[in-house]
Image (spheres, rainbow, N blue to C red):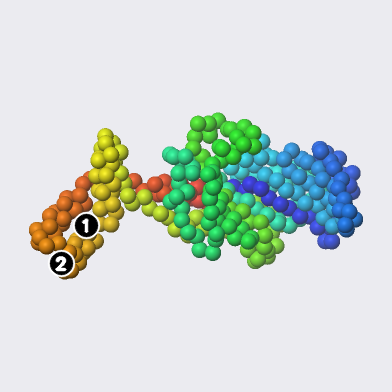
Amino acid sequence: MYDTVKLCYPFYDNPIPKDIDVFRNLSKITESINVDTQSNWVTGNANNMIIRRNSNSITVQGSLPKYFYGNNLQTLQRQDTCLIIDELSDLISTDLSKARVQRIDFSTNIITKHNPSYYYRFLGHLKRFYRHSDKSSLYYNQASKKLLFYDKIKDARAKQMPIPQQYENKNVLRYEMRLSKQLKKFFKGDVFAKDLTNRDLYFRILDKWYTYYKEIEKQKSKINIMSNQMISPKDFDKQLLIGLVQSVGYSYIDDVIEQMKTKKTFKQKEYYSRLKSKYRRLSKVEICDQDIISEIDMKIKEIVLNEKSN
């Protein structure tokens, strides 16, 4: 479930590879200089991975599944991370297993019944995160981390990525956690590229990914409207009233009517019994009660269980 990572191989405590060995197998090689500091760096590409060398270190950044599969719609297996690190190490003649991890994106795809953006309204507040959304994405931001929900098919098409067959004509919701700063504080110590395949570390990240999701306040779809019972605006009014009555419950309505009765709101006493009779009847109408967000709850739980069984 790893996606984009950033690895830093510092020279102060590691062997320093030769430039020619680092860039021999790379493409799109460019050299840049900062005119103010006179510092320079060289950049090259290995497929989608960007390799950058300056006087102090080598950094490698990009999507691991995109490098491995050619797209990042497919979910990378934990065991395959080691293969990618080894291959990149051979490619640039540098032992990247010793590189410190400076960024981890952890994510997977969820095939849903509805368009991904439909679910955003049911994902509410998350403590200590700033929530905001646009037409295609939902964000929960902190200074050092971010949670995202977005339409992965829309994202892939915008980036002109091929759509794997299993996702063709599907609604695909992406849930992603980005750890981009203060990873040493988050993990209570340095994390190296060689650690990414470690089961304990992987499950710690998985548990955090899952915990953050569970801590999001869920807005239950309590007001249910039976659209198959409507042929006119009057029918809509009736179905909306039924949904509202059942969302608050008859006991609440009964309390309100009793308060009105105490205050002598109506002159005719029979009005109170008529209202009670009406809303008691509406509260017993059978309607299809579907909690929209429970679909995502169930599928994310299944993902976690499946990952831990591998």
* Residue at left offset 22%, top offset 63%: 256
* 217 sits left or right of 39 in the view: left
Q: Nearer the viewer, residue 303 or 134?
A: 134
Q: Residue furthest front?
A: 267
* Residue at left offset 58%, top offset 32%: 164
Please tell me the numbered disc located at residue 250. Answer: 1
Q: Work out whether residue 133 can be spotted.
A: yes
- Disc 1 residue type (three-letter): Tyr
Please tell me the numbered disc located at residue 126. Answer: none
Q: Count the marks: how many?
A: 2
* Residue at left offset 77%, top offset 51%: 59
Callout in the foreground (1, 2): 2
Residue hosting label 2: 264
- Disc 2 residue type (three-letter): Lys
Where is residue 186? Give x, y as percent: 63, 63
Q: Residue furthest bottom?
A: 262
